Amino acid sequence: MKTLYLMRHGKSAWDDPSLDDHDRPLAPRGRKAARLVGHELKDRGARIGLVLCSTARRAADTADRLLEVMDAPDIPVERERGLYLCGAGVLLERLRDAPDSASSLMLVAHNPDLHDLARELTGSGEERHRAALAEKFPTGACAVILFEAARWADLDSGAGRLADFILPRKLS
């Protein structure tokens, strides 16, 4: 079995209009959301084997804060420019290339890519989580999707079960 955590970066700051989109930092609300979701995952005993993260500052900061709260400094993090606003298809191909030694992965990236990917992969799960995911994938949210697959290369459309959809606004 494989577990996939799809984490959308926290709310970003728009204070400095001269910054390139890639370089925008987290807003205070985004920093808080990353900490809240990190605490929730830690409390639930989440075990993440590898983090794949966009190089955008808001995504990297989200991953850093989340892992810090989880007290998980030993989890490897691969920061990749190719995960920045690349489309759901590219994200899926990257997941399929992940090492099978990691039974669980976290992907920290952006919308609409994450929302599209989550909807594509999810074929079952609790109705309230599926309804919330169908509506939107808010900043700071984390979808937890389980697969009955031995290899990441076997991820397929509709094969995942949405086990949880963690919304930071419901944790505060």
Image (tube, rainbow, N blue to C red):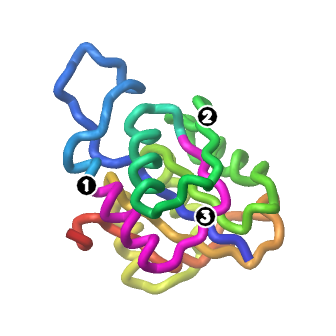
Disc 2 or 3, which lies upstream in sequence? Answer: 3
For residue 56, which quarter of the picture?
Answer: top left
Q: Which residue is mark 3?
A: 48
Looking at the rendering, the stretch of residues picked out in magenta corresponds to: 33-53
Check disc 1 and give the amino acid type. Lys
State the residue position of label 2: 80
What residue sits 59% from the left and 78% below the top? Answer: 161
Crowding around mark 2 (Cα neighbors within 10 Å: few <14, some 14 to 19, many 20+) is few
Tell me if residue 47 is in the magenta stretch: yes
Distance Cα–Cα, label 2 vs label 3: 18 Å
Q: Amino acid at mark 3?
A: Ile
Q: Quadrant of the N terminus?
A: bottom right
Give the structural element (helix, strand or loop) at label 3: loop
| Amino acid at dot 2 | Glu
Task: Look at 60% across and 64% down and name the residue there.
Answer: 48
- SS for tag 1? helix
The residue positioned 65% from the left and 49% from the top of the image is 76
Tag of residue 32: 1
Q: Quadrant of residue 152?
A: bottom right
147 or 107: nearer the eye? 107
